[in-house]
Amino acid sequence: SQPRPLHLTTRHSIKRKRRSFDTHKGQAGRVGIWAGSEGMLGAASLCAEAAIRSGAGLVTLFTPPTLYAALASITPREIIITPSINPQDLLKSRFDALVIGPGLGSPVASLAEKLFAVIQETELPCVLDADMLNLIAREKRLDLFRKNTILTPHPGEMARIYPASEHFSRVPTADNFTSEYSSTLLYKGARTLVAWEASPIYHNSTGTPAMATAGQGDVLSGLIGGLCAQGYPNLEAARLAAWLCGEACQLALRESHITEETLTASDTIAHLAQAFDALT
Amino acid sequence: SQPRPLHLTTRHSIKRKRRSFDTHKGQAGRVGIWAGSEGMLGAASLCAEAAIRSGAGLVTLFTPPTLYAALASITPREIIITPSINPQDLLKSRFDALVIGPGLGSPVASLAEKLFAVIQETELPCVLDADMLNLIAREKRLDLFRKNTILTPHPGEMARIYPASEHFSRVPTADNFTSEYSSTLLYKGARTLVAWEASPIYHNSTGTPAMATAGQGDVLSGLIGGLCAQGYPNLEAARLAAWLCGEACQLALRESHITEETLTASDTIAHLAQAFDALT
Amino acid sequence: SQPRPLHLTTRHSIKRKRRSFDTHKGQAGRVGIWAGSEGMLGAASLCAEAAIRSGAGLVTLFTPPTLYAALASITPREIIITPSINPQDLLKSRFDALVIGPGLGSPVASLAEKLFAVIQETELPCVLDADMLNLIAREKRLDLFRKNTILTPHPGEMARIYPASEHFSRVPTADNFTSEYSSTLLYKGARTLVAWEASPIYHNSTGTPAMATAGQGDVLSGLIGGLCAQGYPNLEAARLAAWLCGEACQLALRESHITEETLTASDTIAHLAQAFDALT
Amino acid sequence: SQPRPLHLTTRHSIKRKRRSFDTHKGQAGRVGIWAGSEGMLGAASLCAEAAIRSGAGLVTLFTPPTLYAALASITPREIIITPSINPQDLLKSRFDALVIGPGLGSPVASLAEKLFAVIQETELPCVLDADMLNLIAREKRLDLFRKNTILTPHPGEMARIYPASEHFSRVPTADNFTSEYSSTLLYKGARTLVAWEASPIYHNSTGTPAMATAGQGDVLSGLIGGLCAQGYPNLEAARLAAWLCGEACQLALRESHITEETLTASDTIAHLAQAFDALT
């Protein structure tokens, strides 16, 4: 078959949505997030903050009751934090998009089953990231890579969910994977690729090696979820989020108090506004 | 009857109070707040911070003892946080204004009864917001909408406390409601309305769709409470608070690190000072 | 007898200590603080932060073990927080100055006794503030107002420890009080007075009614303790601390993000550096 | 024998590593930290933040399970915090460098034994700081000063691990110590010395007496660990970290909101970026 076209995502390629004058917070999008575990609450908090800073109007973060106080202490006050032991609570509230995975760790089997059930049931845009991808790989539940899901593997995670990736370079991997699975794919790397089914394969044009630091992936997945909740189609949300994170970091490095060494994922969040404003 | 006049609240309409040289913190106003519940502590904290930043000298936030540590971890150190299971503690300290409701969730019946009793007893300016309005609607306790209360419903909450609102546009709704109830009404929307009994109906002139994000209502109710505690009459406090929040957000959007997407309720608080200074 | 002279504390009146090149943190001064109680941990944290920002090298804050986690969550990481139920631990470590009282609440009798014992035993400069003054008044332990203590009452607290103050204006009150007791007195007010035994009575020349807000007293007492620990004599430490707090607030008000209404005690701390630099 | 040469560490002496375009977070270096105890969690948090801001890609901080929530509340969200009672967990994950000691307090004997065992087993660059040095001195385990370790004593700690230091001035002490032990030595003081075996003895050229304040040592040890994890040789990591901390503080003092009195260890961290950028 003919190879798919390669496109570049630039500041000109995605139209920024603007709110109408009478938008209220419900209309601005509701995101539900299942993330975090003991030791990795920061990932959950970064993801939720990115979602609220993406423009979503309401973000709810679910957490085991025993971790509630610790998670609340590090999470922006605008986030609702719902203690829960059952991921199916994600299906009981009204959300416009879901994010599952950042800082999830290695859930016990019963929790894993419930997470699988949620992914299977939901028709919402649903970002699957990090440990959720590892869990799916381990339990061989690749049937969950449905059309409404958005997957954000880095190369290590890609090797687990799609071992064939080790035999191909990045573009054919993205091509083959999205031919085989109906998910939207955001394949992290020095030049992140985004693709979906028969879409072109999009290279991201932003980014810096300063992003090789903990938490950047958590910010990215929260941002995708937030953009989906606002009505960006999954493919555009993934492309835009990758572009925004890379642009935010490039802009951050222009500041005197940030260098390649010191940049953290929180700095990325702090520069999302400038990145949004750099969109034409 | 003749329709009530419509006025606009602008930077020229409300006189900013200035402190005399020898003001002490007790004279600057004392606010008591009952707010927050598991999962929604951020609402309580935002409300309390807005109250202290409104110029009130002392702000006390009441919280169930089990949530004390988590709430303390996210609340400015200048706020006193009193663990309590009984809202009637609001009546035992010396306050100049009360705020009840942000992040309250769905209180159990016994707590609801005590909250009703406090609202019934107090003669202080008393802001009723969010879940407190929902609770009053559910329990059909509209008798609590007394002269000293200030109600801050958004359209969804308005529909619950005043189902007739669904048949009218916003101005007649505000007109009818304040003819029927003696509360001061702040009716949220793209142009917030403020009215009281036979007063004109005031349109707010500030605001932006960037405010369609979680927590803005909590900031607003804390601000009203803080202004009442400083001696602004209820109607003026409500008008001024709505104006300040809208103006703060408009000013925030001029900064390079804030956009329509990224603006949060904490950003509103951070720009209250500039909004106060914009008053003539 | 002849009235004592009245002097003004200005930026020219107190010589700022500068560190020699090889100062180490032990030489920069060690402060021990007993402060805080459930509901008022913020006072303890503000006091400790002011002490470390005064230039003291090491600050240790003692807290009941049950409050440790909550206090740690709001206190700068440079502060050591020692869980303790016994104030006599203040005497077991090596400190150069003590501060007792901010946010203390109403200690039970056994704790009160131990606090009295510490004040009685220590020869260190010892700031007694807020609830510690109320406790001393209530238990009629004015014998504790020894030469090494520094008292920082506002008018309400003054009336409790020295009821005669209600019959005199501020200067004669300060005069009489320091004739009767050998403590250094910092008598808060729109123009704070500082005096000691036969010293002149010093009027502070800085300050603003924006300081009529919670927590300013906690900052002041921490600052006095920190300055004493660095070797400023008690009278000079009290004069300088009052001057610095007032100057810091005046400078803070020049910033666009701070007004009379929004200024908090944390803003005072954030402007101490500019106040130090304003000393000639 | 002939005395070792004395060199100066300046902005020209150490080549800053730059990342290649396709660096990922694993390649940027992984640091494992055992630090903190009740009352001294701030030290652990400062150390971990310095490590992540040094450019390390992943930083894991181990903490007793009972302190997890309090530590999480004060630590940047990008840090992984692993509850553990067994230091040997440091050997089970993949790290590129270890830091042991900041805020450790006085561990019980069983914990001390496990810490000794880790230091004995690891071949990774391993920074031993503060209370870990005191513990080694107390238990006479100087056999642990192996070639891969980096020791960061201040003069008081030096006197404990090497009593002979009290009879010599600083340079001969560094000379003798590193002739006797194969560790890299960073000997703190107004001019910090760094040496290793037969290397020259390096004087640091940066620093200010404003650094005589709590927590600076914790920042330094985290920074060394982070630099080692990125592939800087131990001697260079120690020299560079000392230079960066001193430079950061000098730069911080140029800001209007920081003076000799108010500078804290967090201010040092906040100025590391400017210090990195000052390297030629």
Image (cartoon, coloured by chain):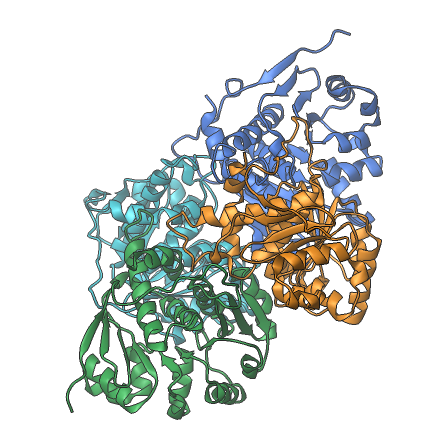
Chain colours: A orange, B blue, C cyan, D green
Question: How many circles with numbers are drawn on the protein?
Answer: 0
Residue D135, quarter of picture:
bottom left
Q: Report the side of D269 relative to B82 (left or right).
A: left
Residue D22 is situated, as x and y percent measured from the top left of the image, at: 50, 60
Residue D159 is situated, as x and y percent measured from the top left of the image, at: 29, 84
Q: Report the side of C95 relative to A131 (left or right).
A: left
Relative height, residue C64 to residue A275 (above, below): below
Q: Is residue A246 at least partly visible in the picture? A: yes
Instruction: Report the residue at 45% width, 72% height from top.
Output: D229
Instruction: Report the residue at 72% width, 62% height from top.
Output: A64
Q: Report the side of C213 relative to B131 (left or right).
A: left
Instruction: Report the residue at 19% width, 85% height from top.
Output: D168
| Foreground residue among D259 and B194 | D259
Residue C217 is situated, as x and y percent measured from the top left of the image, at: 42, 49
| Foreground residue among C129 and D54 | D54
Relative height, residue C253 to residue B187 (above, below): below
| Foreground residue among C62 and B12 | B12
| Foreground residue among B201 and B33 | B201
Relative height, residue D233 to residue C150 (above, below): below
Residue A220 is situated, as x and y percent measured from the top left of the image, at: 60, 52
Q: Residue furthest left?
A: D2
Residue B240, quarter of picture:
top right
